Amino acid sequence: MKKIMLTTAVSCLSLLSIHAAEQKQIRISTDNTDLILQVEDNGRLYQSYFGEKLLNEQDLKNLSWNIREASDQTVTPYGWEVYSCSGNDDYFEPALSVTHNDGNMTSYLYYQSSSSQPVEGGIETIINLKDDKYPLNVTLHYIAYTKEDVIKAWSEISHQEKNPLILSSYASTMLYFNAPSYYLTEFSSDWAKEVRMSSQQLQFGKKVIDTKLGSRAAMLVQPFFEVGINQPVEENQGQVLMGTLGWTGNFRFTFEVDNKENLRVIPAINPYASNYELKKNEVFKTPEFIFTLSQQGSSLGSRNLHQWARNYGLKDGKGSRMSLLNNWENTGFNFNQDILSQLMKEAKDLGVDMFLLDDGWFGNKYPRKNDGAGLGDWEVTHDKLPGGVPALVDAAKQAGVKFGIWIEPEMVNPKSELFEKHPDWVIKQNNRETYYFRNQLVLDLSNPKVQDYVYGIVEDIMVENPDVAFFKWDCNSPITNIYSPYNKDKQGQLYIDHVRGLYKILERVKENYPNVPMMLCSGGGGRCDYEALKYFTEFWCSDNTDPIERIFIQWGFSQFFPAKAMCAHVTSWNRKASIKFRTDVASMCKLGFDLGLKDLSKDELSYCKTAVANWERLQNTILDGTQYRLVSPYQTNHMALNYVNEDKSKAVLFAYDIHPRFQEKIMNVKLQGLDPSKNYKVEEINLMPSSNSRLQANNKVFSGDYLMKVGIKVLGGGDLQSYVVELTAQ
Ligand code: DGJ
C-alpha cells in the first residue's frame, strides 16, 4: 500500500516538474474590475480572482492559495481551470470537448505563452495553451475596455492531427464565482412578447438557457443574462454579472453550481446537432462573449454596456439616427405608387427624416400580395409599382425625405421563381414532410452561391438606386427540417456554417455600402446580438407596439442595448392609449411612426409634429446621453427613466403611469446623473395643443442636488398618462 502511495506521489512530482512552468499571473483589468488568471505549478491556467479591482499590487500574490481554499481540493487541486476540457480532473461542465484521432476524448491544456497589447479602447491579452499529448492548441483572447468596464472574451481552437478532430462543445470562455448564493435573470421571448424578465435562484446542478432555432435564433430567449451575486439583481446596488454572446445563431449559456457552491458560467455556441469536424490547421473561432461586472447593480452595468456599444460595438455607434414613417402597420401589403407618394408627403409634413417602405413591393410571377408567396424574387411588382424603386426614390426626393426599403433576403417562399429554379438552395429534407414557418423556408447560407445571391439583392437595389438610404433586413423563419443539400457530408456544421455564411454576406454589404444604415429585424426582436450589430445601426425590438407592452420590452432591451439601437414606432396598437402616450413611449428610443396620419385629429397631428421636433432637438441627449432607469414597471404601476448629456447641461425625463392604484402612495421621482451643483430649469414638453402642464415643478428651477435627493412629482396623473420633461442647466 505504502509502495503504491509512494509511486503515485513520485509520478505526481514528475508530472509537476515536467510542467513546472513559471507561476505566471495574468491580470485583465478595467478601471473597476480585475480578472486574474494564474499559471499553477502544474503548468495549467486557473482563474484566481474575478471581482472589484484590487488596489494593491502586492496583494495579488495571495490570490492563488485563496482560491485553492474555496475550490474542492479533492477534485480540482488548483481551483478553477480557465478553459477546462472534457476528460480531465474537473468533474463539472467543461469549456471544450474533443475527440482525438485515436478516439481519446480527454484533453489537458498547458500554458505556453501570453502577451498583451493596446487595441482600440483597451488592452488585448492573448494566452496560448497546448495539450502535452496531442497537437491541440487553444488561444484565449480577452479585450479589457478600460473606461467602460467591459471585457470581451473569445477563443480559438486548432490542431495538427492528421484527420479532423470532433469538437462536441466549444465555449467562448468560462467564469467562476465563489459566493453564498446566485440569482439568474433571464429574458424569455416569443413573437410580440420579447424580453420577459424573470429571476430565479441557482441551486446545485445546471441551469441551461439555449436556443435551437438556427436563424431567428433569439425568438424564444435572448442571448443575454444577468447574475446577481449573493442577492437577486437590483437596479442600483449589489454585484451583477451581465453577459451577452455575439452570435446570430444557436447559443447556450450554462450556469453550474458545484458541490462547493461555486458557480461556473459558460457562454457558448449551442453544440446541439453540431459535432464540428475541425480540419488540421483550421482555426475554430468562437463568438465573442461581452460582459461587465457591476458593483452597483444592473443600472450601472447597462450604462457600461451602452457606452461600450456606442464606442465599439454598434455599427455607426457615434452617428445620429433617422426618425421615420413606416407603412407596414398602416397599409400592410395594400399600396401602390400613389399611396406611397402620398405617405412620403405625410412623412415630410410630420417632420421625420425618412419614409420606409415595408414588405409587399416585389414578385411578378408570384406577386407578394400576402406572406404566402414571392419571397426570393426581388424584382419590383410591375403592375403595382410601374416606375419601380427609382420612381419611389424620386417621389421621396420630391417630398423632401429619404427613402428606405424592407428586404428579407435569407428566406424563400416555395411559391417563388427562386424556389422553382434553385430548390437545392434551401434548407429542407426532401424525404420528410416539410414544416413551414410563415409559409417560408430558409436559404442555405453555407452555400457560397447562395451567399452571392443574397448579397446581390442589396447590390442590385443599390446599383439601380444609389440614393436608397436605409434597409430594414427582416428574418421571419427559424430553420426547420435542417439539412443542407450543399455540403452533404458536413451536416454537423450546418448550424454554424449557416451563421458564418450570413456574416460573410453582411461583411460584403458593410464593405461596399458602409454608410447605409440598416435595421436588424426578425419578426420583431427575434435577432439581437452584438455580432449582428457590427453590421446594423439599430434593431426592431418587437412587432408589439402596444405602448404598455413596449414599456416592459424597452426596459428589458435597455439592460443590454443603448436607446440609439432600439427602434420604437408609434402605431395604432392599443388605441385606448392616447397618441401622446404612444408617442412618448416611442420617444425614449429611436423614434418612428407607423400609422395612418390621416386618422389623427388636427390636435393629435399637431402634437405629433411637436414631439418629432422635440425628439430631433434632444436626440443628442436621448440617444447619446447616459441612461438612468428610475422606476421599474416590474415593481410598480409606473415607469420612469432619464437621460443626461455628456456635460450634464441637459437632461430628459420620461415618466409613465400605467395604472395607478386607488389612493396609491405616489413617490417623487428622483433623477440621477445630474450635476448636483448646477441649477436646472424644469419644463414639461410634448404637451397636447392648448393643454397646460399639470406638473407643479414646471418652469421652476432646482439644483441638481435637489432633483436627485428630493425629486419632483411627475407620476400619479391617472391611467396611461405620460410626461416628458426637459431639464436645462441655467
Ligand atoms: C415582420 C416584421 O417584424 C414587421 O415589422 C414587418 O416588417 C413584417 N415582418 C413584414 O412582413
Image: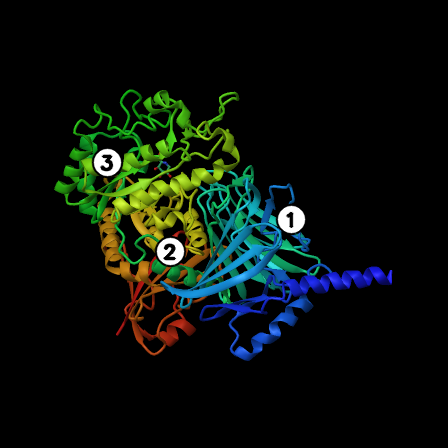
Q: Secondary structure at mark 1?
A: loop
Which residue is disc 2 drawn over?
313
Pick the front one: 485 or 726: 485
Q: Secondary structure at mark 3?
A: helix
Element on which disc 2 rests: helix
Give the CA separation, mark 2 to mark 1: 36 Å
Q: Position of residue 663 (x, y in %)?
A: 49, 60
- Left/right placement of residue 139 relative to residue 260 reads left
Q: CA distance from mark 3 to mark 1?
A: 52 Å
How far apart are labels 3 and 2 at the CA level?
27 Å
Q: Is residue 65 left or right of residue 55?
A: right
| Residue that label 3 marks | 461
Across and down, in percent, residue 156 comes to 49, 51
Q: Amino acid at mark 1?
A: Thr
Number of other residues with Cα within 10 Å of mark 3, as a class: few under 14, some 14 to 19, many 20 or more: some
Residue at (46% x, 35% y) in the render? 478
- From the image, state whether disc 3 or disc 1 is nearer to you: 1
Task: Point out which mark residue 106 bears.
Answer: 1
Q: Amino acid at mark 2?
A: Gly
Say which label, 3 or 1, has the lower sequence index: 1
Q: Amino acid at mark 3?
A: Ile
Q: Are marks 3 and 2 in contact (CB under 8 Å)?
A: no
- Between disc 2 and disc 1, whose residue precedes? 1
